[in-house]
Image (cartoon, helix red, strand yellow):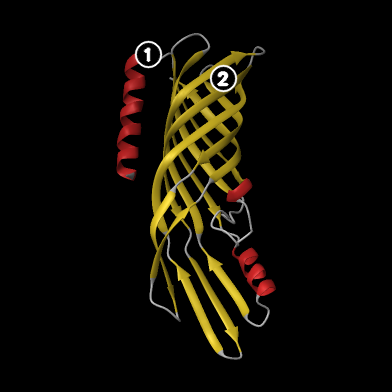
Amino acid sequence: MKKYFYLFFISSITSFNCFSQDATSVSLSLGTGIPVRAFASKNNKGDSAGVAQIGGVTDISVSYKLLRNFGFTGMLRGQINGSNAQALSDSLNKTQPSVQWSVSGTSWKMIGLMAGCFGDFKISKNWNCHANVLIGVLDVTCPEYTTTGTSANGNIWTKQYKSSSSAFALLAGIGLKRKIKDKYFILFKADYYYSYPEFNNVEIDSSVDYPKFTNINQKIESVNVSVGFGITL
């Protein structure tokens, strides 16, 4: 799946440049991805809790202005959010105090290819207001969790292996763009990101049972704040 992301994105850049050099811009942004709602939930009583922590986000965008204030844009986007394994440990130790529980986990990893439209409106000599709405495909890898328990009767462990899935994704954002030279600009932007992947046949192994397989649905929502640098070609 990922190789098709890159091929499609490269072809998009080529297509944009063929249309009009003056109307094409490229930007690179870095920022913070803040999980919200179920994605950030620490309630491990259901599958809906993502226990995701604040992470990082980056994207590279290519935009083509079709009209004076409107155009099309393509984006290759990556995001990583750690998992709050300590919250899971605390919850288990609270509900089962006779066992000393410890949980370790890896991170949520996401890469998406998005396309959509944008609006760009001048508000002063060097400042523009910028808004966009994009849809696309997100490739998500869920964390791997290892849980160990120690009690007077011995030790036990369970392990949920990482798994990958692809799903529809939506992004809506708004920001400010400041011109700093003839063809260069900086971006200050915030966006909302949504996806709802399903992870099929996730393997769960343990010291007291044979490996089992289950399906996990996880709603992913995050609010992201980033700063970027761009150039008009």
* In the image, farthest residue toward the top: 68
Distance, label 1 to label 2, CA atoms, is: 20 Å
Q: Residue at x 57, y 70 (%)?
A: 103
Residue 214 percent coordinates (x, y): 41, 62
Q: Secondary structure at mark 1?
A: loop
Q: Secondary structure at mark 2?
A: loop
Neighbour class for label 2 at 10 Å: few (<14), some, many (≥20)?
few
The reply, left or right, for residue 129 in relation to residue 26 is right
For residue 94, what is the image quadrant? bottom right
Give the label on residue 181, or none: 2
Residue designated by label 1: 20
Q: Amino acid at mark 2?
A: Lys
Between marks 1 and 2 in the image, the one whose residue lies nearer the viewer: 1
The reply, left or right, for residue 104 in relation to residue 204 is right
For residue 125, what is the image quadrant? top right
Give the label on residue 127, or none: none
Q: Amino acid at mark 1?
A: Ser
Q: Residue at x 63, y 46 (%)?
A: 37
- Number of numbered labels in the structure image: 2
The residue nearer to you, when weighing 60 against 173, is: 173
Decide which of tag 1 and tag 2 comes sooner along the chain: 1
